Amino acid sequence: MKKLLDLIAQELVPAFEKAGYDASLARVSLSNRPDLCEYQCNGAMAAAKQYKKAPIMIANDVVANLAESTMFEKVTAVNPGFINMKLSGAYLADYLRKMQADEDLSVEKAKEPKTIVIDYGGANVAKPLHVGHLRSAIIGESLKRMGRFMGHKVIGDVHLGDWGLQMGLIITELQKRQPDLVYFQDDYTGEYPEEAPFTISDLEEIYPTASKKSKEDESYKEEALEATRQLQIGKPGYRALWDHIMKVSVTDLKKNYGKLDVSFDLWKGESDAQPYIPDMVQKMKDEGFAHEDQGAYVVDVKEDTDTKEIPPCIIVKSDGASLYATTDLATIVERMKLYHPEQIQYVTDKRQEMHFIQVFRCAKKTGLVSDDTKLSWLGFGTMNGKDGKPFKTRDGGVMRLENLIKEINDEMYQKIMDNHEIDPEEAKETARIVGLAAIKYGDLSNQASKDYVFDIDRFTSFEGNTGPYILYTIVRIKSILNKYQASGEDSQAGQIGVAANASEKALMLELSKFNSVMEGAFEEMAPHKICSYIYDLSNAFNRFYHETKILSEEDAQQKASWIKLLVLTRDVLESCIGVLGFDAPERM
Ligand code: ARG
């Protein structure tokens, strides 16, 4: 369905043209004076110079031509030349009825669906998932769902950090502890055991121990580096250990991401890109893109228009090793070959900005992707504690994701139990659902690039701009609908009618924005726009609810019309939270 703003602009076009003005002036926006009108057109101001006329005269000409229009309740020309509009109640009701009948609730799906790879999550294998990875998972999941909602083919890839020094560290530490394992016998030719010689809890202890040792002991670090190198050139025993580490870690990661309702289509990682590196590097050298610089190979990526220094992209280090950029470039080669995406979208900490500038420029310059392949990056800010410093546990350590989720759920559980009598088991499940909304909404409601303060008290509050408030609104609607149904009525029977009062009209106007909000949020990769929309929509609903006695209304037709309006409000809110990545409980 067309967006309401476009329909209004379309209505203004003939009015401008008939008065002798250009059609392009008929642009309409939401009013920035909601006390005066709902929509406004500033075209007359823009036209003044061109037509050498006072803007108010132009506005008057246009308004005169709208006298017959049934779209508006009121159109006025206001000094110095605004055209202020109020939509007619009948027109608005008709728009919402059409929206309700549309299976996509008025959102126009992409006419030419694109294949989009979203690279998010980015956990590092064998290292615990900490809050730093939380944002990438939450934001990326929402971008993925937005893309799908708009009709695109979106492939989510977790892109694990599975090829670095942490693997060598674990192997080294394991060898010290259990030197007799077959993985360390160079003359071993048999099959390696199916079962890993460690559990996830072992790994969680081994990695930090080894990492600490390597920082204190140079020769230990050398050993770990050598083990990493041996692994990367394919030493069989180390490869077998790597397989074990991967299996044990990925099982654990899936469990953790599962708790966040975050899921990936691909569980690929840096290791998958390695086979593509040699040919890619050779080609960059052969074609003259990569040149030698102090023993290393680099591709220059600076451009004349740069306002800051953009260093060359290093492809091969002087010791022959590849780097983070090399792996990301080779991953682009792999993705183009396997999935032919029109767009690759990355979601990482904003401190990686330079890395992605270099990688994207290098990929374009060396022809890994064509000019029309979109490489885009969303850099997010830091999640801080109330003290304004990066979020830590009470004792100052890095907060593990599991513990963070647990803390929120405990807080939520307490609130729900305090609120009313409820079966503890149901309260636990509800706390899980609402807790997840608290975390995700707390994150997504901020513009992603900004730092934000993780404030458990605020995020779990049922009032204010929070996830629980949105869910509370949905649950309130569901409860009214249930009562209506329980009284033997059919909640689908009525039709949305003309607004009976100002708060109902305000709610209807909010609902009509849904398609334009979704489209805009996806275009700008901005989940926070959906959050602020559902906050406004929830407020509009609650105002209407407080001013209207819905269930005790005696006029059955009026009542049925409000019920249909509630159904639409619920459906829009639920579509939005679905895209944000959380659900609403039945009760709370
Ligand atoms: N593993 C990386 C980290 O923890 C994030 C990976 C992001 N994706 C990418 N293609 N570089 O910082």
Image (cartoon, rainbow, N blue to C red):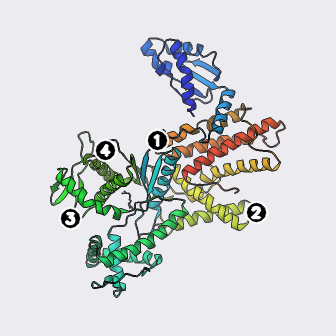
Examine the image and state in which quarter residue 405 appears. Answer: bottom right
Residue type, mark 4 in image:
Ser
Q: Earlier in the sequence, mark 4 or mark 2?
A: 4
Amino acid type indicated by mark 2: Glu
Q: For numbered disc 2, what is the local secondary structure?
A: loop
Chain-order first, disc 2 or disc 3? 3
Question: Residues under labels 3 and 1: Cα distance?
Answer: 41 Å
Q: Which amino acid does label 1 sit on?
A: Glu
Residue on which disc 2 sits: 421
Is 352 on the left-hand or right-hand side of 141?
Answer: left
Q: Which residue was labeled with disc 4?
A: 370
Q: Does the residue labelled 1 lie within 8 Å of ligand 1?
A: no
**Mark seen at residue 320:** 3
Q: Is residue 12 left or right of residue 501?
A: left
Answer whether labels 4 and 2 touch (C-beta < 8 Å): no
Question: What's the distance in space between the residues labelled 4 and 3, CA to CA?
Answer: 28 Å
Could you classify mark 2 by the number of other residues whose Cα lies within 10 Å: few (under 14), some (14-19), or many (20 or more)? few
Residue 441 numbered tag: none
Query: Where is 84 relative to 1, above or below?
Result: above
Q: Alpha-carbon distance for marks 2 and 3? A: 66 Å
Callout 4–callout 3 Cβ contact below 8 Å = no
In front: label 1 or label 2: 1
Gap between marks 1 and 4 measured at Cα: 21 Å
Does 109 sit above or below residue 411?
above
Mark 1 / mark 2, whichever is N-terminal: 2
Q: Do the residues labelled 1 and 4 touch (CB within 8 Å)?
A: no
